[in-house]
Amino acid sequence: MTPTAAPTLVQDLLGGFEMLAKIFLILIPIVTGLELLKIHGVLARVRRPIEPVLRFLGMSPEAGEPFLAGVGFGMVYGAGIILARVREHDLPRRDISILASILSAAHALPEDTMIFVSIGANGLLILAVRLVLLVAATFVTRAFYPRLESEAKA
Amino acid sequence: MRVGGGSALRQAVVVALRTYADLLLILVPTFVLVTLLKHTPAFPWMTTKLAPAMSVFGLPGSAALPIILGIFVSLYAALAAMVGIGLTPAEITTLALMLGLCHNLIVEGAILFRLRTNPLVWTVVRVVMAVLAGLVVGRALGLGGAAR
């Protein structure tokens, strides 16, 4: 990147409006869509279809909703659902640790990826690397815990 | 929790607009400050000092600024700074990946602590993942050829 004619301060500051507009155009549909999913309680309903994914990542079916909430909506919402499940006593310790590893590698994927795409990043590359890291993190984490019955059967 | 189609959509749009308004409080001041900083002599000085550390990832020294803002403030502060300093798409991709893995460490560390997991362990994991991803992807995208 060789600045042929270095932009002036005013030009640079005006460029900020472009950024704000791009982020607006990306963020509003994504947040609106995610909010609609929340309002209509979609997370609880896709529990069954994603069971194979959960099994692959070493979690019990109860971890489905927190998993989707964290990866899809973000850490605060994901953690909130995890804590709610913990209070209801149906989330094993092992699931919480695997979920923590997933949240560490990849939370709020749609929003966090798209905002960088809006300023020129390669979103597919970002998603691919983070999904690989997500899977790797769960495999390392489950090595610290005894195997699930469902895994032992397989 | 309302269910009617129209009111649900309106409710969702209001949340989205409010989210954006909240983000403006971070985006605008960060962008203005970073852009002003860019036009002071302190900026090239800082960039030169940080260049050796950032060149590991094939990034210019100025990329340290969004990384620091991302870790301690938020991902959106880092985003505004990235636009402010002006980077190439490949640099933005590498930085976005590193920042996606490693941001808001203090607030999110507190969240992990609430889950009764060890926040220190996961924070270290996130930093290590970001460094590894930066090393691999920075190279893969052919960054760091020219010394800047």
Image: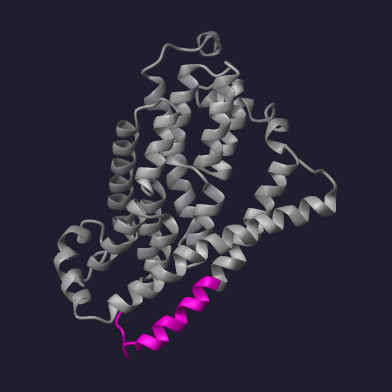
Residue A74 in the image, given as x and y percentages of width and height? 53, 44
State the predominant SS element of the stretch in magenta: helix
In reply to whether residue A15 is colored magenta, the answer given is: yes
Can residue A135 be spotted in the picture? no
Look at the image and say whether residue B126 sits in the magenta stretch: no
Q: Residue at x 57, y 15 (%)?
A: A89
The quadrant in which the C terminus of chain A is found is top right
Residue at image position (61%, 21%) is: A61
Apparent side of residue B63 relative to residue A92 in the rendered image (left or right): left
Left or right: B91 with respect to B56? right
Q: Quadrant of residue B21?
A: bottom right
Residue B102 seen in render: yes
Which residue is at a point 58% across and 57% down the rendered structure image? Answer: B19
- The chosen color scheme is one colour
Q: Position of residue A7 (x, y in %)?
A: 35, 87
Q: Is residue B69 left or right of residue B25?
A: left
Question: Up-down: is A71 above or below B46?
Answer: above
Give the image location of residue B129, x and y in percent. 33, 42
Quarter of the figure with residue B145: bottom left
Q: In the image shown, does B61 or A16 lie closer to the viewer?
A: A16
* Residue B1 position (above or below residue B90): above
Percent coordinates x, y for residue B62 in the rendering: 26, 68
Question: Which quadrant is the N terminus of chain A positioned in?
Answer: bottom left
Q: Nearer the viewer, residue A16 or B107?
A: B107
| B135 vs A50: above or below | below
* Residue plotted at (33% across, 52% down): B72
Q: Residue furthest bottom?
A: A5
Highlighted magenta segment, given as a residue range: A1-20
